[in-house]
Image (cartoon, rainbow, N blue to C red):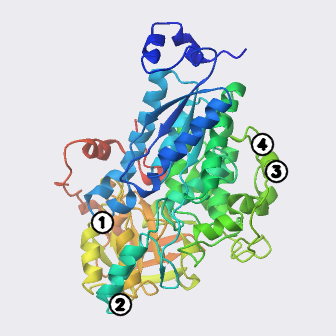
Amino acid sequence: MEKFRSEEIMELSCKGYFKSMGYSEDELGHKPRIGIANSWNQLVPGHYNLNQVSEYVKRGIYAAGGVACEFGVMAACDGIAQGHVGMKYILPSREIICNSVEIMVQAHQLDAVVLVASCDKIVPGMLMAAARLNIPAILINGGPMLGGIQFDGRKSDGTSPDEAKGMLAAGKINQDELDNLIDACGPGCGSCSFFGTANTMGCVTEALGMSLTGSAVIPAVYAERSRCAYATGAKCVELAKKDIKPRDIITKESIKNAIKACLSVSGSTNAVLHLSAIAIEAGIPYEEFNVVDAFDELNKTTPQLAKINPASHWSLEDFYFAGGMPRVMQHLGDSLDLTVMTANAMTLGETLAKVKYTYPENKELIRTKETAYSQTGGLAVLRGNLAPETGVTKPGAFDPSLYEFTGTAICFDCEEDAEEAILGGKVKPGNVVVVRYEGPKGGPGMREMYKAMKYLYGMGLNMSTALITDGRFSGTNNGCFVGHISPEAADGGPIAIVEDGDEIYLNVMEGKLELHVPDEVIAERLKRWKRPEKKDIPNGYLKLYSRVASSAARGAVIDC
């Protein structure tokens, strides 16, 4: 009979504490205690259905002979936090999520844990915790939202009103049209219905092997989501009995698989940050395996097989019907390491061989290697004298005519100033909008420049301007942008000394981001530069994070 670590503490007085909550003698016997880390709340649309998901997870756990022990985990909504001080807290919340799962699992010596989560920082935070704890674990997300009313040639989503605000300012739509869009862009709960970070990380988790194959993009409101939750609960008990742990699954090889899968569907640039952090938590040294470099190298040989909103009119629901990540990974074939272990308790190759599809294939949405949208991936790493360590962009989401761009800088030291200038008509065709002091330390919190890009789109400037920043971008953004620029401005990176009117050059295919200013001028500006004092950091977690956060190149993790 298996011996579980929870049995050791059950021999002590803690059994009485469990009985005080109604647990039975049978439940406290020789059965694995499976934690359910549930980030349900009534603030985040992507989490609104997680209590139902969790109930089906419990059913699966009990049916497989385990005991379910649920606990809560915090979660914040990127969409609601956009464009104000709340966004400063979003990336730093990832570390709190990771730490809270670690604390709950270790304090109560659980045998395994099901991670019930959705959205941008919650899924990676929980995966970081799983890698750190290294007890049997599996993740299930809540599924994407269905698309809303048609707008600008595709199904609308929660970000469409911000594009519409720019259109309103440009006189392209009226207020009644904007109000109607706000009412109808989100028809129900789920993670955002575009292919942003939330759904990217669901797909990355599946490709990494930490969730059941086929689970990533089942819509939130589909009954199949509940059946998948039941199977996930049962599978976690199997993982506990077989002692299959996250570090058996999260390896350099499986991370490369996840990177290739992300590139093949043009996932969010935030995946670079999160996979870097997950690799560190899995005990893979940064010096031994640099995730940013892996993205850079693998992008050159990984074809882009799918385009999903905002890169096309196809929705997440369409991607689900077309076969989702299993179909993509099958088309990638031997480009992936099929021998890696997965949370299915089988290798990736064994799992993909068993996939059955409910709906017809859509060969236009998910293509083969031979008919790929591009023979290179949907994300790219840029470097140069403006980004010595790294800059990350998403060519899969913007027009190839922008892959090479030269423009004149117009500089802003915060997101709000840039947004005001865009809506005020101060940004002109040919400008490169520079938004700095928004990195992990400088922001602090590395905010997304989501609204700035949406306003450029709405103002009709998305095909004639570029935006670069030491902050981040939302996966919904399209247009010519480069984020994650490191070193960040607050650390004295070259982005700090760019001046209005400077010429900036970027070339996606050659991986270049350069400031066309003489080296001696750059050196003199850097010599004169002094880090500006940030007077608006409130006492509390943000002040701590600003002191201990690492660079974007290292995943913006807390640097101990």
In terms of depth relative to the viewer, which is nearer, 545 or 211? Answer: 211
SS of the residue at dot 3?
loop
Q: Is residue 268 above or below residue 15?
A: below
In the picture of the structure, the residue carrying the numbered disc 3 is 354
SS of the residue at dot 2?
loop
Sequence-wise, the earlier of marks 4 and 1 is: 1
Residue kind at label 4, given as amino acid type: Thr
In the picture of the structure, the residue carrying the numbered disc 4 is 347
Sequence-wise, the earlier of marks 3 and 1 is: 1
Q: Which residue is drawn at 60% across and 16% down?
A: 26
SS of the residue at dot 1?
loop
Q: Is residue 402 above or below residue 238?
A: below
In the picture of the structure, the residue carrying the numbered disc 2 is 173
Residue kind at label 2, given as amino acid type: Ile
Mark number, residue 83: 1
Sequence-wise, the earlier of marks 3 and 4 is: 4
Q: x and y percent of residue 63 in the render?
A: 67, 32
Q: Residue at x 54, y 17 (%)?
A: 24
Q: Distance between the residues labelled 1 and 2?
A: 22 Å
Kindly indicate whether the residue at mark 2 contacts the one at mark 3 (C-beta within 8 angstroms): no
SS of the residue at dot 4?
loop
Q: How far apart are marks 3 and 2 (CA)?
A: 49 Å
Mark number, residue 8: none
Q: x and y percent of residue 69 in the render?
A: 51, 29
- Residue 196: tell me if it is visible: yes
Q: x and y percent of residue 214 in the render?
A: 69, 54
In terms of depth relative to the viewer, which is nearer, 249 or 234? Answer: 234
Residue kind at label 3, given as amino acid type: Lys
